[in-house]
Image: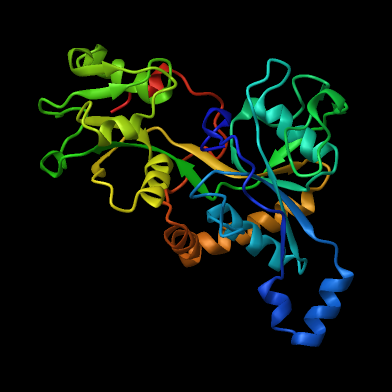
Amino acid sequence: MPRHRFEHSAVLALAACCWAGAALAQAGPQGAATALAQASPLTVCMAEDNPPLSHAVQGQPRGLDVRVAQAVASALQRPLKIVPFESKYEGESTLSQEVNALLSSGVCELTSGFALMAADLGAPARPTARVPDYPGAKRRPLREWVPLTTLAASRPYHAMAMGLVVRDAARSSATLASPGDARIGVVPGTLAGTAVSMFRSGALRSQTVSLSRTDDVLALLEAGRFDAALVPLARLDAWRMAHPTTLLQRTSYVHPLRINIGLVGRADAPELLAAADRVIDRARASGELERWALEAGATWVVPGEPPVALTIGLADLVRE
């Protein structure tokens, strides 16, 4: 998930909600009401506070993930029920295992915003895991260990990418290759921090300002602690949503690394993922995906090849 567990909020903000599909509405009020009453909701788990992909605005779910899930539910002629969840650092399980537990236990049928990495799909690496926090979940010590199943993914509908962000408009043409005298804030050990530190065998190290993992990179950039930072585009989008008057802006530089984002479900329910694939293919071809992203306040990034990445290595981070 393009904002993984270390970026999740500690507050569960997104309320569970059902949506009626547009296709049902075309059948008329009575027909739609009858069909919705008979159809079971399509349950989709989403990160609870992950703007601009999934978040709440005045109690209503918003974001690109929400819009994609709506379209899939509409294509299936089912109402949509969103199940928000929050993942925390736990030594007992990974985020992908917690997502698997949500799907394996029947809490939801699909999960959105999933980073399409080969290691997190297919047969599980361990037999059991506990579900993360979601509305109705028992307290963690009381949660059962869920037998995990094999996962499969939809086609990607978005991709994570990192862009160079500056505070001063005079630096809007900066790139990693030509940063001028910009001081660049980096968090060691992160994808962005490694990409900057290893760029051209360390050519930028004399210009970097080292930060801790608890530092808010964009807040410090806004405050003028340094002049530029390489950050996920979704993180900048979320910052802009929370700070409409921000001075921060993205330069034209975007790092070549792409991590595709898609829906994930149980491999023994291929009809759901096939429906999702049809919706994603149609929305991408028509330009709707890009429009949905714009309406959600997200910078839409065209998914890269291959759809599912085998791994991310140093070679991916030092590419220019």
Q: Position of residue 1 (x, y in %)?
A: 57, 37
Rendered view: 184 above or below 156: above
Q: Residue at x 72, y 54 (%)?
A: 16
The answer to whether residue 149 of the structure is visible from this angle is yes
Q: Is residue 31 left or right of residue 99?
A: right
Which of 308 and 139 lies nearest the eye of the viewer?
139
- As drawn, 267 above or below 271: above
216 vs 135, left or right, is left
For the C terminus, the image quarter is top left
Q: Residue at x 70, y 80 (%)?
A: 25
Image coordinates for residue 193, horizontal then vertical, percent: 36, 21
Could you say which is closer to the camera, residue 126 or residue 212?
212
Q: Residue at x 81, y 38 (%)?
A: 137
Q: Position of residue 54 (x, y in %)?
A: 57, 50
In x, y percent, where is residue 46? Answer: 65, 46
The image's colour scheme reads: rainbow
- For this view, does 224 lie left or right of residue 189? left
Could you say which quadrant of the image residue 17 lies in?
bottom right
The answer to whether one can see residue 318 in this image is no
Count every numbered label the image shows and give the total: 0
* Frontmost residue, 112 versus 151: 112
Dividing the picture into quadrants, the one containing residue 190 is top left
Q: Residue at x 41, y 48 (%)?
A: 242
Q: Is residue 243 left or right of residue 284?
A: left
